[in-house]
Amino acid sequence: MSILQDYQVQTEQNIKHLEELCEKERNTWSNSVAQLEELYQSTYTGQQELEMRISVISTKVIQIGHQLESKSNPRQQLVDARTTAKYLERFLDANDDVSLMFQDASKLEQAAHIIHQLYNVLQELPDEAKFTDAKTKVKDRYMAIEEELLLEFSRAQVRNDKKAMKKYIKLLSKFKGHNDCIQNFITDCLKVC
């Protein structure tokens, strides 16, 4: 029996030793988990603080963007008004030959914008003799540019250049011939079908 008792004592010692090892291992891992939980909590708190700061900063950026836009729009309107006034002055000058104005095909978009503004401005002016000549000149240029835009739209349509078509239809939307352009487009599409 002594062998069995020795074996039992040895087994109990092994069990006790293994239990101690397990307890040490458990304590080590418990400490590691506790440290990781603290690190996670710290990181999570830091992330929340960063999100709050980002939110505050993005709100400020949006506010600054709105402020810049509110400053930029009036400036652009002033530049447009000044440009329109310079062109209007040339049209009002009886000695100035404006027939060559807006002849550059590469600047058709700019010419369309300016002549449309001039046309609208002159519609507001009274029917007095001093404005009659300018109104006639602007109307002639208006019609010529509108015709050129219609022609360019048709060319783009023949080439099936959708980007150019979109550009010219957008420009023509300000002109009276916009409906004619749409009608021609529909007619041409029906011919193809």
Image (cartoon, rainbow, N blue to C red):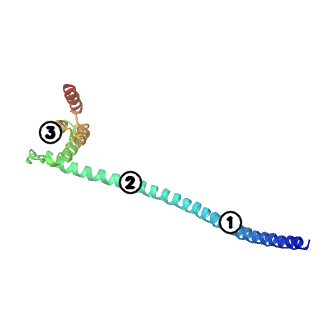
**Residue that mark 2 sits on:** 69
Which residue is depicted at the point 15% across and 48% down?
Answer: 106
For discs 1 and 2, the disc positioned in front in the rendered view: 1
Along the line of sight, which residue is nearer the eye, 126 or 155? Answer: 155
Amino acid type indicated by mark 3: Glu
Q: Secondary structure at mark 2?
A: helix
Which comes before the other along the chain, label 3 or label 2? 2
For discs 3 and 2, the disc positioned in front in the rendered view: 3
Along the line of sight, which residue is nearer the eye, 102 or 98? Answer: 102
**Residue that mark 1 sits on:** 33
Marks 2 and 3: in contact by CB < 8 Å?
A: no
Which comes before the other along the chain, label 1 or label 2? 1
Along the line of sight, which residue is nearer the eye, 150 or 193? Answer: 193
Residue 153 location, x and y as percent?
A: 19, 37
Residue 191 against residue 8 in the figure, above or below? above
Residue 41 location, x and y as percent?
A: 64, 63
**Residue that mark 3 sits on:** 148
Residue 28 against residue 86 in the figure, above or below? below
Q: Secondary structure at mark 1?
A: helix
Q: Is residue 67 left or right of residue 171?
A: right
For discs 1 and 3, the disc positioned in front in the rendered view: 1
Q: Secondary structure at mark 3?
A: helix
Q: Is residue 64 left or right of residue 97?
A: right
